[in-house]
Amino acid sequence: MNAAAPLLEIDGVSKRFGPVQALDRVDFGVREGEVVGLVGDNGAGKSTLVKTIAGIHSPDTGEIRFAGEAVRISRPNDATALGIATVYQDLALCDNLDVVANIFLGQEEITGGPAGATRQLDEAKMEHRAGELLSSLAVTIPSMRTEVGTLSGGQRQQVAVARSLLGEPKIVLLDEPTAALGVPQTKQVLELIGRLRERGLGVVVISHNLANVFEIADRIVVLRLGRAAGDFQAEETTEEHVVAAITGAGGNGEKRGEEEAR
Amino acid sequence: MSAAEGTTPATAGETREAGTASQAVRRFVQGDLASLRVVIGLAVIWAIFQFENDRFLTAENLTNLMLQITAVGLISIGIVYVLLLGEIDLSVGAVSGLAAAVMAVLNVQHGWSPYLAIVAAVLVGTAIGLLQGSVFTRFGVPSFVVTLAGLLAWQGALLQVLGSTGSININDPKITGLANTFYSDVVGWIFAAVVIATYAGIVLAGYRSRVSHGLTGESLAPLAIRIVLVALITIVAVAVLNSDRGVPLALLILLAFVVGFEYLAKRTRFGRHVYAVGGNAEAARRAGIGVDKIRIAVFALASTMAAIGGILAASRLLAVNQSSGGSELLLLAIAGPVIAGTSLFGGRGAVWTALLGALVIGSIANGMDLLALSSAVKFMVTGGVLLLAVIVDAIARQQRQAAGRV
């Protein structure tokens, strides 16, 4: 254990969808300036765990602590307010809106106006800030006013990552950030994750690509069938160990669920 | 994943540049320039009717056309918002009739002041929309079904409110004045000057704001062209209207609502969220947007605009009867924006398509009346035009999908 308390702690969280036990008493945590790779087979509960942290799903049982205090994250806004940003695998972009509108979706800048609903969007300010943000991430987009639906997969991923950084989050959750990318853009995204760590952000990366995970992660957490099945320091383990934990052939995690099942 | 997508951003940018030449053609086909298509279509329609009957483009007939499209145009404004969500509201015709009946009964039979009667009628519309929107969001019933039930129910309510007489004549000058007031030439020109100055002010303020944030990419030339174009249209329209009875109050009401709701759609947070929900409701939800609230608000807005349209229609006809807000009105109100380029599939469109679409549909109806065509022909032609517009919308969508733009 590090001296520093984890920024985000998940303690015994369970989530059931009808007959499917998606998460079964999972413990999880991420510290400031730490990149955690979250790996596991399809249906292991990776996306459910991320969505629980992001406020899409409410956990059935268990506790979430942020900066040491128990918090309730029942809506996406709750997570955003705490400083937890999420980039989903499907990117959650509106293809009919342009790059600026997507980056600022739900957090639009407004200028002075009479009141409430009549206040005007500050398009120029948003475009300016979006441009700064994208160039600070070394992202090139043909035009800030391009509809996102016309962009390539790599560009869409970059817009989605940029979007997540807008609210100066403390933790960024990335769901398969490199799944649809070519080699150069994968490298860019991994470099970007490294920069997030340097800024002191906690980063959770879901990935199927173990090579990518080992390249970027400080710690690797394995989920299997909704349970925590392994927790490795990336420098102290090998791909074989992680694969064994993913497939159920071995692991160092708590296996209270499996023991009870027997 | 194509090879182009795997390249560095710089080269990806270049590939995009290469496509600029054919971009205008592609955008025309894919519906981004649908408005231009519709303006050309409108010109063709006007030319045909003028060729068949030279009374069509007279100042008197064009003024009549403006009065005829007011009610449909107002209802279409609400429909545009519903279509932007990717939903449909089939109850707007019935709601417009019911609201008009409520106004007439309160004013004529109960002696309410015209203002109170109008406010009550509008609130009836808002309440109906809130109810339908809540049923839609709360129970997840498709909007098609909720509002179809509404269509029947509010039709019944209309008959109930009208009672045994079945028809109420309106003679309160405040109410009939809505559709039968015309302004003098001077007022018309003042109006034109205000419109042009305001438009130029807004466009230039937007340009200044961009410059002050260090943004480039938009030169002054296209802005100047837009201002000149708006000025020309305004001047010609006022000149034509002045040469007959003058600028009608009804047209000003319609234009004020179009401008106001266009502003709401394009320049405010609420409008942006409406587009977002229509484009990708799940993305909107994850962005923290209250999707259900937006939906309920939009259905309330649609029913409110339907009520206002119904009031204007009653003012023009000087009466409310059992066929007020009948089925044709509903279909025309939906057809107009779709013809003018608002997508039935959600997320794409603009409020001014309500005005442009009402003009197209109104012109066809007006022209066929001038030619004394039978109702049979009129229904079939209007149906054909609607079908054509929907097919164009569907083709545009297919081509967007083929180009990777869902």
Image (cartoon, coloured by chain):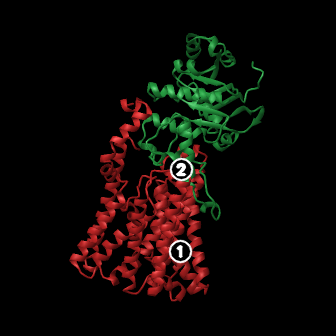
Chain colours: A green, B red
Position of B208 with respect to B53 (left or right) is right
- Residue at disc 2, secondary structure: loop
Q: Label 2 belongs to which residue?
A: B214
Residue A139 numbered tag? none
Identify which residue, A140 or A119, lies in the foreground: A140
x and y percentages locating residue B145 in the rendered image: 47, 57
Q: Please state which amino acid type lies under the numbered disc 2.
A: Gly
Of the 4 image quadrants, the one containing the C terminus of chain B is top left
Q: Position of residue B138 (x, y in %)?
A: 59, 52
Residue B99 - label: 1
Host chain of mark 1: B
Residue B280 percent coordinates (x, y):
50, 46
Cα distance, mark 2 to mark 1? 50 Å
Residue at image location 53% in from the left, 43% down from the top: A131
Name the amino acid type tagged 1.
Ala
Residue B223 x/y as whole percent? 43, 61
Q: Is residue B19 above or below residue B224?
A: above
Query: Does residue B399 appear left or right of residue A63 in this picture?
Result: left
**Disc 2: which chain?**
B
Q: Quadrant of residue A65?
A: top right
